[in-house]
Image: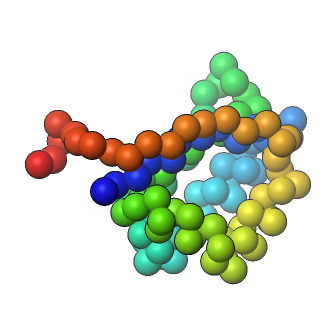
Amino acid sequence: MTFANAGTLGSAPGRRDALVAHLTQRSEALQEMGCLAYEVGVNDEQPDTVFVVELWTSSDAHEASLQRPEVQASIEAARPLLSGEFGGFQFDVVGSPLRD
């Protein structure tokens, strides 16, 4: 069952664009881990917030990815860009009008 993780990452003041650049670096490894989509966005009404929507083959694949050394290194590299404010939600996808 497809798993969705949608969240917000607070950026340190003035660091949003750097955080976006970090999060959008090309990563073939994500697909190998079971990531189907990783979309990063912004909203100028919330200038210190980055929005991320992820689709994974399963919640287990998502959880396992967080233990991978390359993901841990990416999280560490992002820490100076973050304010510590996080939000979001997760759910199991049960259907879509775009596919069978």
Q: Say which residue appears at 60% left-offset and 36% top-offset.
A: 88
Question: Quick one: 99 or 64, which is closer to the camera?
Answer: 64
Q: Say which residue appears at 57% left-offset and 70% top-offset.
A: 65
In which quarter of the view is residue 22 placed? bottom right
Specify the color scheme: rainbow
In which quarter of the view is residue 34 placed? bottom left
Q: Quadrant of the N terminus?
A: bottom left
Relative side of 26 to 74, left or right: left
Relative side of 48 to 91, left or right: right
Query: Residue reaching furthest top?
Result: 45
In which quarter of the view is residue 14 placed? top right
Instruction: Let me know if residue 26 appears in the view.
Output: no
Instruction: Let me know if residue 40 appears in the view.
Output: yes
Across and down, in percent, residue 75 comes to: 74, 63
Across and down, in percent, residue 10 comes to: 76, 38
Across and down, in percent, residue 8 comes to: 65, 38
Q: Say which residue appears at 66% left-offset and 49% top-offset.
A: 20
